Amino acid sequence: MPEEVLFKTEQSRSREEIATYLRAVADKLDGNGSLTLSAGDESVDLAVPDRPTFEIKAERESEGNDSELSVEFELEWDEGQEGESGTSGDLTIE
């Protein structure tokens, strides 16, 4: 199945800033599950269902003598439980 990117932002941030974004997501998930992700003039509205699939992945990517570590957090659910469109600029989570 082809993938369509609805929203993406990538920017260096402090751990404290990242924690603030993750807390905002957690608060929205604790509430009604509605997330609005915005960066610049792009945004996406998502309605997260009560039981999405939650994936956490830690990886190491190596190229020559260089390596990069990452941690990815992902929520997945079947469409029909809402999604919309977005990219670029400062990230906000409402």
Image (cartoon, rainbow, N blue to C red):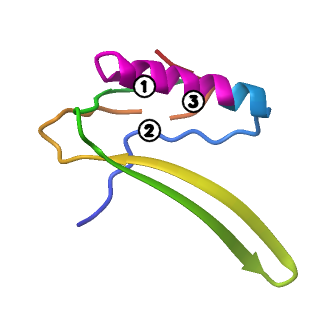
- In space, the residues marked 3 and 1 are separated at their CA atoms by 17 Å
Quadrant including the N terminus = bottom left
Residue position for label 1 = 43
In the rendered structure, which amino acid carries the disc numbered 2? Phe
Residue position for label 3 = 22
Image point 69% across, 71% down: which residue? 60
Question: Which element carries disc 2, helix, strand or loop?
Answer: loop
Magenta range is: 19-38
Image point 33% across, 52% down: which residue? 4
- In space, the residues marked 2 and 1 are separated at their CA atoms by 7 Å
Question: Which element carries disc 1, helix, strand or loop?
Answer: strand
In the figure, is residue 85 to the left or right of 19? left
Image point 26% across, 34% down: which residue? 83
Residue position for label 2 = 7
Of the pair 17 and 89, the residue shown nearer to us: 17
Give coordinates of residue 9: x percent, y percent. Answer: 57, 39
Of the pair 18 and 45, the residue shown nearer to us: 18
Of label 2 and label 1, which has the lower sequence position?
2
